[in-house]
């Protein structure tokens, strides 16, 4: 069995269930020692008390298969708990090499019905959670690089969503957080490249507790068949991005699901208009832009997912 991550240490957040669990198991299968983080709340909206059981069960599963893993019960959206998570990896295995940010919650509502708390809580867990762990991991890698006098090994894999790419009417908080994660990823990629660290982001599509409503109408596989929406389709890409083979992959956005990996380009200019004077007037913009958009429905977006033929289900 190939073990490209042998000798490396990984953190996977939200790893007690679903995608995070599949990713933690895959990184361990590829040889990494894994810190399995999960706050363990039973509700996908972040409700219920913290529970160490999901993280501990995944860590135990990794150890039973011959790997190395420890569990961490902590809220990554809490700055100090994120610090403790990174420190646990360093204290247990000597260093941190891989960070996979996956933890998240859902509090869906239309924009006109959404409360301030529903907005803040989702932004906090997804976007601030990604920032917190990335911050402390980057401090660790920067210090190691300065001590070594050159680049070190570091990989960040963040989790966005097609809700950011294609839009999601009932998830303005989630879509905004996932868009923010893309911006965080590309900024981090530029900032940490000189230290030897890459930062990439995936938009996975998988049948998990978070997406049970989205894929409720999709037929589930028969006995012995692999679900095309299984998280196990996503995990190998995370393993690849965490590996030495992906050293030249940095600041990239990849959509992944059911045997498909699509590399998404940065937005391109689709049309350009120049003023005939020193500055545009309302009248000139009306004459140029109104005809340009005349045949487009008002709900059409610039969604890259549609161009790719990967429209969200």
Image (tube, rainbow, N blue to C red):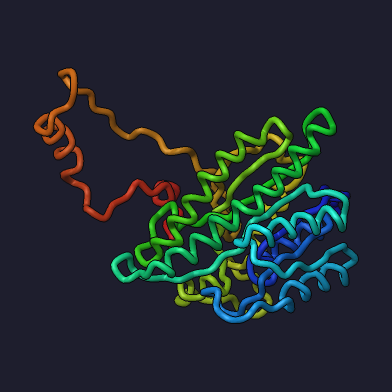
- What is the number of callouts on the image? 0
Instruction: Please state if 124 lies on the left or on the right of 148 as rendered.
Output: left
**Residue found at the far left of this picture:** 283
Please name the residue shown 81% across and 38% down the image. Answer: 144
Instruction: Please state if 303 lies on the left or on the right of 202 as rendered.
Output: left
Question: Which quadrant of the rendered structure holds the C terminus?
Answer: bottom left
**Residue 223, horizontal then vertical, whole percent:** 65, 80
Up/down of 122 relative to 146, above or below? below
In which image quadrant can residue 159 be found? bottom right
Up/down of 31 relative to 151, above or below? below
**Residue 153, horizontal then vertical, whole percent:** 78, 40
Please name the residue shown 71% across and 48% down the image. Answer: 137
Please name the residue shown 47% across and 77% down the image. Answer: 216
**Residue 284, horizontal then vertical, whole percent:** 12, 29
Instruction: Please state if 25 lies on the left or on the right of 207 as rendered.
Output: right
Residue nearest the observer in this picture, 203 or 59? 59
Please name the residue shown 37% across and 67% down the image. Answer: 170
Instruction: Please state if 50 lies on the left or on the right of 125 as rendered.
Output: right
Question: Which quadrant of the rendered structure holds the N terminus?
Answer: bottom right
Up/down of 236 relative to 232, above or below? above
**Residue 60, horizontal then vertical, whole percent:** 83, 73
**Residue found at the far front of this picture:** 80
In which image quadrant can residue 293 be found? top left
In which image quadrant can residue 72 be found? bottom right
Residue nearest the observer in this picture, 215 or 122? 122
Residue nearest the observer in this picture, 149 or 306? 149
């Amino acid at each position: 069995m190939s073990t490209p991550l042998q000798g490396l240490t990984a953190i996977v957040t939200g790893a007690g269930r679903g995608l995070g669990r599949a990713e933690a198991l895959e990184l361990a299968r590829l040889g990494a020692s894994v810190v399995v983080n999960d706050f363990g709340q039973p509700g996908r909206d972040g409700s219920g008390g913290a529970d160490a059981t999901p993280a501990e069960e995944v860590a135990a599963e990794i150890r039973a298969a011959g790997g190395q893993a420890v569990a961490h019960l902590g809220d990554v959206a809490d700055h100090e708990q994120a610090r403790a998570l990174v420190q646990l990896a360093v204290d247990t295995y000597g260093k941190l090499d891989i960070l996979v940010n996956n933890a998240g919650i859902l509090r869906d509502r239309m924009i006109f019905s959404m409360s301030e708390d529903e907005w803040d809580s989702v932004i906090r867990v997804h976007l601030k959670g990604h920032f917190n762990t990335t911050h402390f991991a980057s401090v660790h890698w920067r210090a190691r690089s300065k001590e070594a006098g050159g680049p070190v090994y570091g990989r960040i894999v963040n989790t966005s969503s097609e809700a950011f790419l294609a839009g999601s009417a009932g998830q303005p908080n989630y879509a905004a957080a996932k868009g923010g994660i893309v911006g965080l990823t590309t900024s981090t990629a530029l900032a940490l490249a000189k230290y030897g660290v890459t930062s990439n982001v995936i938009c996975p599509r998988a049948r998990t507790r978070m997406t049970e409503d989205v894929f409720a109408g999709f037929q589930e596989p028969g006995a012995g068949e692999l679900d095309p929406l299984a998280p196990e389709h996503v995990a190998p890409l995370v393993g690849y991005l965490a590996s030495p083979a992906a050293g030249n992959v940095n600041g990239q956005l990849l959509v992944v699901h059911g045997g498909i990996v699509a590399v998404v380009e940065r937005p391109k200019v689709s049309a350009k208009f120049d003023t005939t004077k020193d500055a545009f007037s309302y009248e000139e913009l009306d004459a140029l832009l109104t005809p340009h958009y005349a045949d487009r429905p008002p709900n059409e977006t610039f969604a890259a997912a549609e161009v790719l033929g990967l429209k969200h289900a």
